[in-house]
Amino acid sequence: MEKIAYEKIGQAINEWYKIIKQNNVPKATEMREEIQKNLPQMEKNQDVLLYFNLIDSRFKLMTESFNESGSLLKDIEKQALEEETDNMIQYYFYFFSGMYEFYKKNFTKAINFYRIAESKLIKIDDEIEKAEFHYRLAVAYYEIRQNFFSLNHAEKALESFTAHDTYEEKRINCQMVIAANYVDLYRFEEAEKQYNLAIKTAATFGYKFSESLGCFNLGICHERREMLSEAKIYFRKAIEIPEHRESVICIRSMYMLSRILYKMDFLEDARMWYKKSLSRAIEENDNVYQAKLKIIYCLYDQHDLQDLEKAMEQLQDKNLWSDVADLAINVAYYFKKQGDAEVSSKYFEKACHAKDQILKLTEALS
């Protein structure tokens, strides 16, 4: 059988990666199968095989096969970082490693990988790749509440994606990152306007998952404004979208819906969504959301401060200080309403301490 030129396979991988960046899962899956079928007939070339494995690790991140992606990156690390390896390969390794650490919720570690990747990206002449990089960095900075850094990178990404017709969904996602930062900065009307625009655009183009993310995020915006009935509506809308239910992101929506319902004293419904979210979190081995669910259950249902504090410590151990601050404030307000000034004061202080730690997170960035 005649061998396939490795350049041809390399070009096919380039096209595959473009489709992955467009978040087109069905087409990317189809292209992966075709490339895999042709690899055994390819002229021997270790660089192209390494390139395939790197892009495959990115594909696995897109399809939420996070453990498989991490294992693949670990397997190819030594080869990817050899001195003679080209700049693009090293960029992909650091960039995808950052994405993997982000999905593990190791946000400062993710940013450190992104920063190494950035030193390689300077030499790469690809506007969309740079836009993708800025988008991922914007999301990571948002998670550690470095809002102005996040906004800066999100706006850069949005400008580049807007210049290309085939990246509408990426534009929507950038708008939502900008809106999320607006919520943190108490610019609620601007945030709501951005989210509504993102939801409308996603619905128009049929991007159901992005539409669901817009609904989820608008729910967060309403919850922050104590507009609980409106928040409940949007969390339900997100969960009703099949693409959302099939994603691990649904754990977050069910958690938030349970939290809202507990606050509104709808205990039976709150317990139902708590159980659904916990079941999914256990299935996905998501220890962070198991801890967050434990906190709301101990606070609103079990009334067990000892177990609540143990769960809070789990979040602190992972340096998830924005979650600690958010939940500590909820605990503080709950006990304030109960007339327990001592416990309320303790958790207000914990929230303040957590916010101080958020500011110190930048010191952990090498």
Image (cartoon, rainbow, N blue to C red):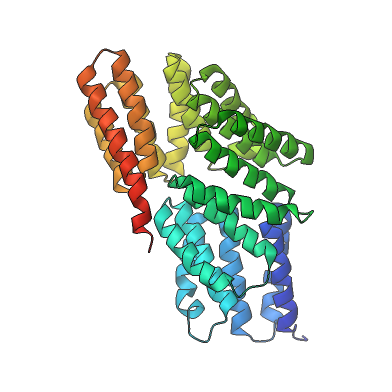
Residue 274 vs 120, above or below: the answer is above
Q: Residue at x 72, y 63 (%)?
A: 31
Which quadrant: the N terminus?
A: bottom right
Q: Quadrant of the C terminus?
A: bottom left
Q: Position of residue 73 (x, y in %)?
A: 49, 68
Q: At 73% across and 34% down in the image, what residue appears? A: 200
Q: Residue at x 27, y 34 (%)?
A: 350
Q: Nearer the viewer, residue 236 or 131?
A: 131
Q: In this orientation, which residue lies closer to the viewer: 229 or 16?
A: 229
Tell me if 272 is positioned left or right of 30 in this view.
left
Please state the horizontal and vertical placement of residue 82, each as a whole percent of the image: 48, 83
Q: Is residue 319 visible?
A: no
Q: State the image coordinates of residue 24 (x, y, percent, origin top left).
A: 71, 53
Residue in front for this viewpoint, 244 or 328: 328
Residue at 74%, 84% in the rendered image: 5
- Who is closer to the viewer here, 146 or 272? 146
Where is residue 315, by image quadrant? top left
**Position in image of residue 275 (x %, y %):** 44, 28
Q: How many marks?
A: 0
